[in-house]
């Protein structure tokens, strides 16, 4: 099939540049892909639909004539408005613009589409831990993600663990599912400049030695168990470095603050709040140890980011996190606070842990490059168009109307 000039559209309405938890996770994933596609060596053309409040910033941060940023006709920051736009206005926009392949990077496709489709299923947390989701969001994700995965021309997951679940639990044909790992930007690397690290710590009033968690404060991150493990660590070693919990508040986080108070750890645990993207590598590189004990992740990008910065890392041994950390990260049962405490003590007391991770961490995380991620999607878009053309008995470019 001749795919020259293939027209691809992407729904980027969840991209956010604000200093909140929304500028993380799916937003960063989507925009990293968008930036990479704008620089890719391909003749594909990309139409990117984005919330009108974020369109100007997105246009400034992308380059290349092959990307067209299209602001929404109304604000879609409120979930109900976004869903309405996705299901009503978006299909007509795709038809009018003669789009060949539509990509939803976050789980859900419109019910009716005039073209081939690719949906990225980032995770299935709403099935495993429904109690961590507000009821409306849980019902929406369960209903529409399942339907979208079954209807899509091709499905992308960001970990082998999610692919296995889709195949085994939802009976999605394995040949329709592709695994494309998310990307780590090139600035996540060891920081060799001791003076720069010292200035960073002084700027944020951080001690020379600290333990770090970085992510959205929400129940799925299992921070109550981390706090309990840290309390155990301090009983094992009263000179253990302080723990810094960095990241914006998400939802259902009140119990975390209550647990810190109940354990009398206010002087030893710091809530650092939102961390800007530009400074994240320094937060990782400055830490003695990074701990990410989540109960479930679609991938767990902070694990790989910390390793890329050469920081010893402990994470959970469930879902996708072994894929993110590989043989370099220490893996523990996320429900075992005692085991986590002993793992923290062991890594902190190991004299070669830092030197080993400075070598093995960046080596392991090279597989999570922007170039690999983008190349995977470029191939997937082309393949989706070809499959759709074969199904409908067409040759050449795929057009709307089916």
Image: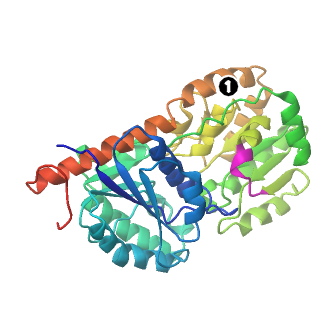
Q: Quadrant of residue 2?
A: top left
Q: Is residue 145 left or right of residue 266?
A: left
Where is 47 relative to 160, above or below?
Answer: below
Residues packed near mark 1 inside 10 Å, few (<14), some (14 to 19) or many (20 plus): many
How many callouts does the rendering have? 1
Tell me if I can see residue 7 in this picture.
yes
Residue that appears at 15% across and 49% down: 396
Tell me if I can see residue 296 in this picture.
no
Quarter placement of the C terminus: bottom left
Residue that appears at 62% across and 23% down: 360
Quarter placement of the N terminus: top left
Which region of the structure is painted magenta? Answer: 273-280
Q: Is residue 261 left or right of residue 245?
A: right
Q: Is residue 199 left or right of residue 74?
A: right
Q: Provide residue 22's location: percent of width, then percent of height.
A: 61, 63
Q: Quadrant of residue 388?
A: bottom left
Where is 237 relative to 138, above or below?
Answer: above
Q: Secondary structure at mark 1?
A: helix
Residue pointed to by mark 1 = 357
Residue that appears at 31% across and 45% down: 380
Residue 119, magenta (yes or no): no
């Amino acid at each position: 099939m001749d795919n020259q000039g293939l027209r691809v559209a992407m729904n980027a309405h969840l991209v956010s540049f604000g200093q909140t938890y929304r500028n993380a996770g799916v937003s960063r994933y989507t925009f990293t892909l968008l930036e990479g596609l704008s620089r890719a060596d391909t003749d594909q053309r990309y139409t990117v639909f984005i919330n009108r409040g974020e369109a100007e910033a997105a246009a400034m941060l992308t380059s290349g004539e092959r990307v067209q940023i299209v602001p929404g006709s109304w604000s879609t920051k409120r979930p109900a408005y976004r869903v309405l736009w996705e299901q009503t206005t978006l299909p007509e926009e795709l038809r009018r613009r003669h789009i060949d392949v539509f990509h939803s990077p976050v789980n859900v496709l419109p019910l009716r589409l005039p073209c081939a489709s690719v949906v990225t299923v980032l995770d299935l947390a709403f099935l495993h831990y429904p109690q961590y989701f507000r009821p409306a969001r849980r019902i929406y994700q369960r209903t529409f993600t399942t339907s979208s995965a079954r209807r899509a021309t091709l499905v992308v997951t960001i970990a082998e663990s999610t692919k296995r679940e889709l195949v085994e639990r939802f009976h999605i044909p394995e040949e329709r599912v592709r695994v494309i790992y998310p990307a780590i930007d090139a600035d996540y690397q060891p920081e060799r400049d001791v003076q720069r690290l010292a200035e960073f710590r002084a700027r944020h009033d951080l001690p020379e030695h600290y333990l770090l968690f970085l992510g959205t404060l929400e129940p799925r991150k299992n921070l109550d168990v981390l706090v309990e493990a840290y309390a155990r660590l301090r009983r094992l070693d009263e000179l253990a470095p302080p723990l810094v919990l960095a990241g914006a508040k998400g939802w259902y986080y009140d119990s975390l603050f209550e647990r810190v108070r109940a354990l009398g750890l206010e002087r030893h645990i710091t809530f650092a709040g939102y961390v800007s993207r530009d400074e994240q590598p320094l937060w990782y590189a400055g830490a003695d140890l990074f701990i990410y004990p989540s109960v479930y992740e679609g991938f767990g990008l902070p694990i790989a980011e910390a390793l890329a910065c050469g920081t010893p890392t402990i994470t959970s041994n469930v879902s996708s996190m072994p894929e993110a950390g590989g043989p370099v990260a220490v893996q523990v049962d996320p429900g075992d606070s005692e085991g986590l405490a002993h793992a923290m003590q062991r890594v902190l007391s190991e004299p070669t842990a830092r030197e080993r991770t400075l070598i093995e961490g960046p080596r392991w995380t090279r597989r999570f490059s922007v170039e690999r991620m983008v190349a995977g999607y470029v191939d997937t878009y082309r393949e989706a168009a070809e499959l759709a053309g074969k199904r409908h008995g067409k040759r050449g470019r795929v057009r709307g109307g089916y």
